[in-house]
Amino acid sequence: MKVVIVGAGNVATVLGRLIRDNGHTIVQVVSRAADNAAILAKELNCAFTDNSGIIDQSADLYLIAVTDTAMSQLDERYHLGDKLVVHTAGSVSKEALKNITNNYGVLYPLQSLRKQNMELQQDIPLLIDGNTDAALQTIRQFAVTISSNVTPADDDQRLKLHVAAVLVSNFTNHLYALAADYCDKEGADFKLLLPLIEETALRLRHYPPHEMRTGPAVRKDIKTLQKHLNLLARYPAIHNIYLKITDSIMNN
Ligand SMILES: NC(=O)c1ccc[n+]([C@@H]2O[C@H](COP(=O)([O-])OP(=O)(O)OC[C@H]3O[C@@H](n4cnc5c(N)ncnc54)[C@H](OP(=O)(O)O)[C@@H]3O)[C@@H](O)[C@H]2O)c1
């Protein structure tokens, strides 16, 4: 397929590479900041513009990967007739595209993506949706060329999975960041925790998370919990989260 990518951030870059590597032709990158558009266009070997008024009209698919807030201003800038347009957001309805084209849908990567050349360990799960059966069919045909993990999901299902994704990815990563900072300040080596982090995540391939719970809160070990809280008195943010999660574990 011939593809135009709108946006030049993390998702535009990672999906752009996948699209290019799987035999499609990227004809143009359109993005707000010309220098970011130029960097991605150079990597993908295509044209670029920061002017939405001169978007290439020859593509089969328009992939919109801009921030959720920018999406609400799209219809002032783009009018693509019957062209197939998809966005990549978890919590934005596909209907956000209805004033741009008659043919639209979603290609949502259910994965945390960073444009820094991080190697992907596995195919990106893609949740797809379309405003008609024909649009969904074409989006599926495209999606399976870049991932072996493609699942249809409507706006409601995608929104719910996005909430769960925030819990399992964004929140846990925030806890890693707090722990890394704490280790740094206390002279402990955060890297010693990496096997524990990996083992905890890998177990979920075989067991449900609630069966894998361990630690002082599950054991209702008040003595150890108190020791930890005493130590965290100098770290109010971590102290607060420790209390809240302990309470949640003890009462669920
Ligand atoms: N990153 C992820 O892990 C991930 C995973 C799944 C889905 N998503 C979704 O994919 C979409 C893009 O996310 P991202 O991570 O690629 O974001 P990002 O790295 O922050 O890039 C955002 C892009 O949007 C453009 N933009 C920002 N404000 C704009 C505006 N007012 N008008 C026009 N363009 C604007 C930026 O242009 P400039 O270059 O000019 O700043 C940039 O190209 C979002 O809907 C996000 O929820 C992200």
Image: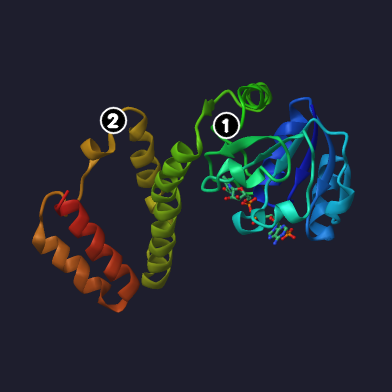
Q: Which residue is mark 1?
A: 128
Local secondary structure at mark 2:
loop
Q: Is residue 200 above or below residue 167?
A: above
Local secondary structure at mark 1:
strand
Residue at point 78% right, 49% down?
Answer: 78
User: Is ligand 1 less than 8 Å from the beta carbon at label 2?
Assistant: no
Residue at point 32% right, 68% down?
Answer: 238
Whole-angstrom CA distance, mark 1 to mark 2, is 27 Å
Q: Which quarter of the rendered image does ligand 1 occupy?
A: bottom right
The amino acid at mark 2 is Tyr
Q: Residue 109 appears at what percent x and percent y?
A: 57, 38
Q: Quadrant of residue 164?
A: top left
Q: Quadrant of residue 121?
A: top right
Q: Residue 95 appears at what percent x and percent y?
A: 60, 43
Q: Is 203 left or right of 146, judged from the image as shown? A: left
The amino acid at mark 1 is Ile
Mark 1 neighbour class, 10 Å CA radius: few under 14, some 14 to 19, many 20 or more: many
Q: Which residue is mark 2?
A: 207
- Of callouts 1 and 2, which one flags the residue occurring earlier in the amino acid sequence? 1
Query: Mark 1 near mark 2, Cβ–Cβ under 8 Å?
Result: no
